DNA sequence: GCTTGACTTAGAGTGGACTCCAGAATGTAA
DNA sequence: TTACATTCTGGAGTCCACTCTAAGTCAAGC
């Protein structure tokens, strides 16, 4: 796949794909004789994983470190696994923080609702 | 309350508190005769709300707009409410995105677990 | 052969949210 | 009263994650 196809498939800009590559998130992308990138299926899977992690806010640098470990082979499996566990813990924290905001918003939205209804009610009565 | 106390209470840096003020998130902070800020209980409540929303990623600019509406009085209640509803929807989206990442991580962590266990098992047998 | 469009690079620019700094004034404790 | 901490202001600097620009290469179609 060429870069524009990958870009469309995953809805990630071409610039961003090249940026990720420079940042070490997509090592070893093959290029044809005239220097044009050719993404393999494995590259695409990686793009998908990156997209998923980035959308949850995992920093590019940490992702880069994780992928570097992947490239080093089996002996880094344990370390990679513990990175993922760590990341998972952070995301759970983040999710819960967001949930608390949602709860606060629900509370406030309800107050507005009651206030506005009370007002309307009041208008009704004075009619 | 003085700025350093507010800073400690909510774990927000003094610089950030002043930055929020400049950005319109904390309008009308009173200052004493020598120009030193004195935060009222209402200011503090606002700081807490800001902290909650910011920790969930609500942009400073939107927060600033919301607070400006608050300052305009009752006739903006409807608009404020719909801003909160909108924000709530975005946070639910965000929370779900993070959940999908967590699910993906769970899946991967499990694969590592199985792989590592299989390896260990193998070592056991060859002993 | 020439244009068009997709690709390449290195490097500069942007936006958001802080974070730090210099220099001045004010407050507090020994 | 001397020293040290805290506050103030305006503005500069930083970090992250892109995003854009300029200048160039290459393949396909007319």
Image: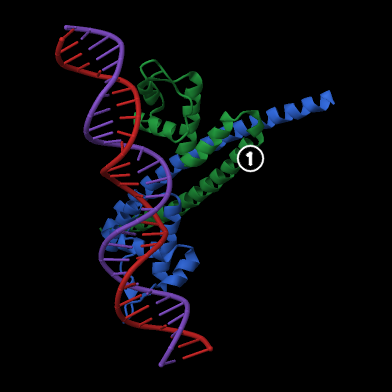
Chain colours: A green, B blue, C red, D purple
Which residue is more in the foreground, B30 or A108?
A: B30
Which residue is more in the foreground, B25 or A71?
A: A71
The picture quadrant where one finds residue C13 is top left
Across and down, in percent, residue A110 comes to: 42, 53
Residue A104 as seen in the image, left or right of residue B111: left
* A6 lies above or below B87: above
Instruction: Pick the quarter of the image with the N terminus of chain B.
Output: bottom left
* B31 lies above or below A126: below
The chain letter under disc 1 is A
* B91 lies above or below B66: above
Across and down, in percent, residue A88 comes to: 58, 41
Task: Tell me the residue that label 1 is attached to.
Answer: A82
Which residue is more in the foreground, B121 or B53?
A: B121
Across and down, in percent, residue A48 comes to: 48, 28
Q: Residue at x 52, y 41 (%)?
A: A62
* Crowding at mark 1 (Cα within 10 Å: few <14, some 14-19, many 20+): few
**Circle 1: element type:** helix
Q: Is residue A45 visible?
A: yes
Q: Which residue is at the far right?
A: B127
Q: Is residue A58 visible?
A: no
Q: How many marks can you see?
A: 1
Q: Residue at x 37, y 24 (%)?
A: A8
Q: Residue at x 45, y 53 (%)?
A: B55
The picture quadrant where one finds residue B3 is bottom left
Residue C11 as seen in the image, left or right of residue B54: left
Across and down, in percent, residue B33 comes to: 31, 82
Q: Residue at x 33, y 70 (%)?
A: B29
Which residue is more in the foreground, B17 or B49?
A: B17
Instruction: Pick the quarter of the image with the C terminus of chain B.
Output: top right
């Amino acid at each position: 796949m060429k870069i524009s196809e990958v870009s469309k498939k995953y809805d990630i800009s071409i610039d961003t794909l090249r940026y990720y590559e420079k940042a070490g998130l997509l090592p070893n992308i093959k290029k044809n004789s005239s220097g044009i990138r050719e993404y393999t299926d494995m590259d695409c899977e990686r793009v998908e994983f990156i997209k998923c992690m980035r959308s949850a806010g995992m920093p590019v640098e940490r992702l880069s470190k994780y992928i570097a470990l992947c490239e080093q082979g089996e002996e880094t499996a344990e370390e990679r696994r513990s990175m993922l566990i760590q990341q998972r813990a952070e995301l759970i924290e983040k999710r819960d923080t967001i949930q608390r905001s949602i709860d606060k918003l629900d509370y406030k939205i309800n107050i507005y609702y009651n206030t506005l209804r009370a007002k309307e009610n009041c208008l009704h009565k004075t009619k």
